[in-house]
Amino acid sequence: MVDSYRPKDLKDALRIRGEYGSTPLAGGTDLMVRYQSWAGTLPLFTNSVMFVGHLHELKYIKKIENSLEVGGTATLSMVADHPDTPRVLRDAVLSIAAPALRNNATLTGNICNASPAGDSVCALYALDALIRLEKNGSSRELPVVEFITGPGRTLLGKDELVTAITIPLKNSSIDNFTKVGTRRANALSKLSFTGIADYKNGRIDSIALTFGAVGPTVVRSVELEKKLLGLSRAELKAGKESILSDYSTVIVPIDDQRSTAVYRKKVALNLLDKFINEVADYE
């Protein structure tokens, strides 16, 4: 049995987190699995727990200029239902489990679980999302690509809470999120792909390509994306084989219980091939 806390507001939550380092629990859909015990018994938490899902100060989504700010306890259903949520993130969120779970699970929880197969994380990498971390007396903001350091690992301090996720609202001529699993719903990803591209004056003005479950973290290469900037549709199509070859070097999946490395790599490159064709054919 471990101690548990139910703070009355955000200030109280930051105090408890600072004093006791208690594990924040909002929806608990990832944590209850991570610390599960035998059927019918309590989960084996190794640390005190602080319930935060009731904190109204963190349960919000609002548009601020050219960004969408998602509060730290906003549920996946709230994200999916918000009219300003980027389509790739909405599609990613709707691919996660079932409606009942999405009504409890939070975007923050999906991020902090730090799984390379996290569907929303794949989309958030492509969207250049920022993670706001707060503790008593200070706050900081990190790009999601820096915040997640490996499977199950983040830069969240023992005295910090994730209080918001800021998502830039990018212009996009074409975008796509694809999840590959054993069935259409309620399945963990074998792999996932997010592509976002925008044209200006007939040439690629911005592009982001991310791959989930093909490395220790979501895979994104800004250097390879830079090579695509300024290309015309014809140049993009003509250079497709070279692009696929470049990405073959950064997509390095492993075998596990859900899939094989060979399958993951082949399908990831197929999804990239398909997206390149869609971008090159865009009118």
Image: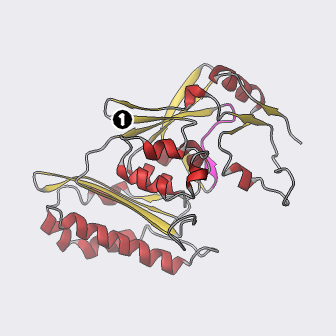
Specify whether 171 is left or right of 188.
left
Instruction: Looking at this view, name the residue that lies furthest to the right.
Output: 1
User: Which amino acid type is shown beneath numbered disc 1?
Assistant: Ser
* Residue 154 lies in the magenta-colored region: yes
* Residue 87 lies in the magenta-colored region: no
Most frequent secondary structure within the magenta stretch: loop
Category of crowding for the residue at label 1, using alpha-carbon neighbours closer than 10 angstroms: few (below 14), some (14–19), many (at least 20): some
Specify whether 157 is left or right of 139.
right
Helix, strand or loop at label 1? It is strand
- Point 76% across, 26% down: residue: 19
Image quadrant containing the C terminus:
bottom left
Q: Position of residue 93 (x, y in %)?
A: 48, 53
Residue 122 seen from this side = no
Q: Nearer the viewer, residue 225 or 21?
A: 21
- Point 44% across, 49% down: residue: 124
Q: Which residue is mark 1?
A: 67
- Point 74% across, 29% down: residue: 6
Q: Is residue 44 above or below residue 47?
A: below
Image quadrant containing the N terminus:
top right
Residue 223 seen from this side = yes
Q: Position of residue 174 (x, y in %)?
A: 26, 57
Q: Nearer the viewer, residue 123 or 224?
A: 123
Q: Nearer the viewer, residue 121 or 80?
A: 80
Specify whether 153 is left or right of 173.
right
